[in-house]
Amino acid sequence: MTELLTSAQMRAIEADAIATGHVSGLEMMEAAGSGVVAAILAWRDGRDGPLSLHGKLPRFFGQTVETGASAVVLCGPGNNGGDGFVIGRLLHRAGWAVEVFLLGDPEALRGDARTNYEHWLEIGDVRPLSDCTSDRWIKQTLVVDALFGTGLTRHLPDVVENVLMATANCPRVAVDVPSGLCADRGVVLSERSLPAAHLTVTFHRPKLGHLLADGPTQCGALAVADIGLAARGIAPFKHDQVVSEAVPSDLRKQQGHKYSHGHALVLSGGVGRGGAARLAARAALRVGAGAVTIGCPPAAMIENAAQLNAIMLQAVGDVGALDAILDDSRINALCVGPGFGLSEDRADKLHALLKSGRAAVIDADALTLLSKDADLRGALHGKCVLTPHAGEFARLFPDLADAMDSTPDRNKTEIVRMAAADVGCVVVFKGADTVIADPTGTCCVNASAYHRAAPWLATAGSGDVLAGLIAGLMARGVTPWDAAQTGAWLHTESAVSFGPGLIAEDLPEELPNVLQNIAS
Ligand SMILES: NC(=O)C1=CN([C@@H]2O[C@H](COP(=O)(O)OP(=O)(O)OC[C@H]3O[C@@H](n4cnc5c(N)ncnc54)[C@H](O)[C@@H]3O)[C@@H](O)[C@H]2O)[C@@H](O)CC1
Ligand SMILES: Nc1ncnc2c1ncn2[C@@H]1O[C@H](COP(=O)(O)OP(=O)(O)O)[C@@H](O)[C@H]1O
Ligand SMILES: [K+]
């Protein structure tokens, strides 16, 4: 499990390491600079670096070992700038021609950053950032962005934006975070569309901003360098402050008959609206539910019967008919919402499903029904999993959605935690940066980014498949939290495994390959 840190947590870990004598600030800065340089050299030489790399780097354009190498290092006023001075020194030692520019007054530099500034002065000079005009941007020059890291607190100054814009055609490595990117929220603190880095080298652990929102686009590829904190865990932080990357649970099937692997009931809408429920049902079956039944209005029986084989079918007329089906105690997981419809009768059926107390995925139309009806919302219970996309989330939790957009220190993980606490069940806020939280504050991010990028998942019906995956896993007895986390993880892996051209129907069919790979 990889923890994802906020800036404040990273600072606390560093401060604790220094206070306990584990490592000094200067040692960490040296390790940070040397981690970045190791990654740069590996990139330039086209070999695998010593750091694990997330995502794909473009070929390092222009420079080769033979033609020599040049870099411009842009240093900021804090410790990110301090890393920059180390990088300048180490690249110089490796034979590079290095120029260094500084934002602000050198006299204002403090601590380890000042020490490394002074070391650099033994090698070369430092000019003001405003001298860094566009005529010096030779295409082959590597730009090292050490302007701001985790300490960025407000929008970028104009001079910084101008210099960053002028680097668009150069190979660019960002130290810790691309300057302008908020390390906690993954949003860019600039009105301008800043060029992305090709490579970002961060330290100790990824920060939330590397995975949320615009983070992956701005970072390019991401490498994580150890700075002497490897053995320092997240111990000082409470459970409800820790965010991890999503990981799948152990999905090996035990021996048994089909009903010992659970029976999922997926509710479908009326005639011509059954495709979404069929996608969900197929995903539930593929992920290993022993049996899956679609319950549809009587008029939609023929349509569904013509499309289904392994999936069973039952007519669900009124709420009484639904209650009769729910009398079968073998049905242990429900999926409601995809193509379900929004009529009053649908609200009554949703109420009956919630009242049954069974594990239930509440998606799509069922979420819209919830947002309009306080009684329905009050019927949610701890075995529910809500799977809103951004629009549905904003309808269900308007205040939280506003806070995420407008409050600088609220990131998506905090918002989803608050949402889960509010409704008392697991909430899966979908997107390329899916965030999952439970009411106790457990929280993870399933990022479809870097080596797991799958933009083709933004295709009609893919959310229905996710709902089915989670329901199928809950039918197998997986807890709502693990089912949500594992379902989101499998959803991304299936999309990555299939590749571009994917449509929603392909996702359940790709699942066996993914399941086989994780079992081996
Ligand atoms: N001992 C440590 O704390 C270590 C820190 N490291 C580096 O230090 C960085 C964090 O250092 P800092 O906390 O000094 O933060 P930064 O270096 O990211 O920036 C903080 C400085 O920028 C100023 N600032 C913030 N936003 C601004 C804006 N919009 N316009 C103008 N000025 C602005 C602040 O007043 C402060 O002077 C990390 O990202 C990492 O690169 C690494 O060297 C590892 C060790
Ligand atoms: N750019 C993206 N990269 C990766 N996954 C994405 C991206 N955009 C959307 N997704 C995923 O695709 C699914 C879309 O679900 P949803 O919005 O409900 O669509 P639909 O209603 O068409 O099924 C979600 O699981 C979401 O996390
Ligand atoms: K930076």
Image (tube, rainbow, N blue to C red):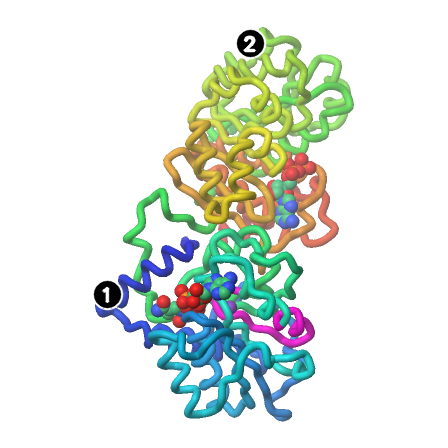
Q: Which residues are magenta?
A: 163-177
Q: x, y percentage for residue 470?
A: 53, 35
Q: Quadrant of residue 107?
A: bottom left
Q: x, y percentage for residue 23?
A: 28, 71
Q: Calculate the distance from the C-alpha at mark 2 to the C-alpha at mark 1.
A: 65 Å
In this figure, which residue is indicated by the disc labeled 2?
324
Comparing labels 2 and 1, the label whose residue is closer to the camera: 1
- State yes or no: residue 166 in magenta: yes
Q: Amino acid at mark 2?
A: Ala
The quarter of the image that holds ligand 1 is bottom left
User: Which residue is at 66% across, 81% downward?
Assistant: 137
Q: Amino acid at mark 1?
A: Ala
Q: Secondary structure at mark 1?
A: helix
Nearest the viewer among 43 and 257 is: 43
Q: x, y percentage for residue 362?
A: 56, 27
- State yes or no: residue 396 in magenta: no
User: Which residue is at 60% across, 21% downward?
Assistant: 369
In this figure, which residue is indicated by the disc labeled 1?
19
Tell whether circle 2 marks a residue whose Cβ is less than 8 angstroms from ligand 2.
no
Instruction: Tell me the crowding category of disc 2: few under 14, some 14 to 19, or many 20 or more residues within 10 angstroms, Cα based.
Output: few
Q: x, y percentage for residue 95?
A: 52, 92
Q: Using the image, determine if residue 119 lies above or below residue 468.
A: below
